[in-house]
Image (tube, grey):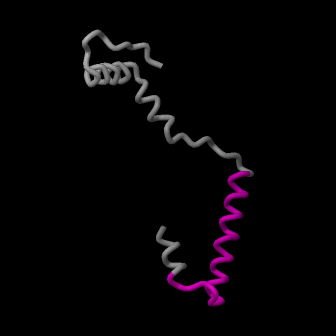
Amino acid sequence: MSDLKRKKNESFESFIRRVKQQWQRSGTILQARKIQYFIPKQSKNVKHNLTVSKVKKFAKVELLRKAGKLPEEDYKNKKRK
């Protein structure tokens, strides 16, 4: 956390500008952006289980679509997303 304090008669905008410059120089913003979307690596078992469940869901949708129980337009809309 930053220990910067607002100077006497300093406007809020100039204080924020000074704080941002300090963060930029120290690399705090860069570090925050790096870890913002960090996704930890999953184990092989977790990856495998997720893949198997996705394949099963896809197969079930395909079976319903071929059987005519799932409307064709619903299938097309979900595929685009």
Outermost residue on the bottom side: it is 68
Report the number of discs. 0
User: Quick one: which residue is furthest to the top in this view?
Assistant: 8
Residue at 50% across, 42% down: 37
Q: Nearer the viewer, residue 14 or 54?
A: 14
Q: Position of residue 42 (x, y in %)?
A: 66, 46
The image quadrant of residue 58 is: bottom right
Front-most of residues 66 and 71? 71
Q: Quick check: 52 left or right of 40?
A: right
11 relative position to 3: left or right: left
Q: Nearer the viewer, residue 19 or 73?
A: 19
- Where is residue 7 shown, x and y percent of the image? 30, 11
Q: Which percent across, then down, holds residue 21?
A: 31, 21
User: Does the segment drawn in magenta span residue 71?
Assistant: yes
Q: Is residue 57 magenta?
A: yes
Secondary structure mainly formed by the magenta segment: helix
Extreme residue in the front direction: 9
Q: Give me the residue at 41% from left, 28% from top.
A: 29
In this rendering, the answer to whether 40 lies above or below 70 is above
Which residue is located at x 71 percent, y 51 percent?
46
Q: Is residue 26 left or right of residue 46?
A: left
Residue 59's place in the image compared with 32, above or below, is below
Q: Quadrant of residue 18?
A: top left
37 versus 52 height, above or below: above
Residue depicted at x 44% and y 35%: 33
Q: Magenta residues, as a range?
A: 46-73
Which percent across, then down, holds residue 14? Answer: 25, 21
